[in-house]
Image (cartoon, rainbow, N blue to C red):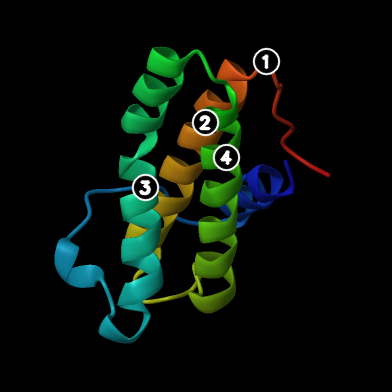
Amino acid sequence: MYSYARASSILRKSPSKLNKLNVDDIESSELKHELELVKKLSQFPDAVIAASNTFSPSVIANYSYQLAQTFNEFYHTCKVIGSEQETFRLALVESFRQVLKNSLALLGIETIEEM
C-alpha cells in the first residue's frame, strides 16, 4: 500500500504529462533498476495464470510483494521528477501503479492514493 501511495504521489507532483517515450531515454548507469522493474511488470500475466491454475492466491500476494520491493529499489536509485528520463520514468511509475492496483484487486484489497 505504501508503494502504491508513493507512486501516486510522484505522479501528482509531476509537472509534466506522460507523452510518447523513447527507449533511448534510458540512462545506462541506472538501467539495471529500470529494467528490473520492467521485467517484474511483464511477469504479471504469468502470475495471474499460475494463481488461477493452482487455485493459489498466494502467488498473487507474493508477486505483489516482489513488485513493491522492485519499485522501491527503482525509486531509491532513480530520480524521477526532474531527471532527463522523466517521461520514461513517469511511465514506469504509472505502469507500476496500474499493475499493483490490479494485483491487489485480485486479492480483494482496495488501494489508497495517500498515506
Q: Which quadrant is home to the N terminus?
A: top right
Measure the alpha-carbon separation of dots 2 and 4. 5 Å
**Percent x, y of residue 29:** 33, 86
Along the polypeptide, which appears first: circle 2 or circle 3? 3
In-front residue for pair 20/110: 110
**Circle 1 sits on which residue?**
108
Measure the alpha-carbon separation of dots 3 and 1. 29 Å
Which residue is found at the position 78% from the left and 41% from the top? 114
- Do callouts 2 and 4 mark residues in contact (Cβ within 8 Å)? yes
**Percent x, y of residue 53:** 38, 15
In-front residue for pair 104/79: 104
**Percent x, y of residue 12:** 62, 48
Along the polypeptide, which appears first: circle 1 or circle 2? 2
Q: Secondary structure at mark 1?
A: loop
- Do callouts 3 and 4 mark residues in contact (Cβ within 8 Å)? no
- Give the residue type that dot 4 points to: Asn
Task: Name above or below for residue 31 compared with residue 11.
Answer: below
**Circle 3 sits on which residue?**
18
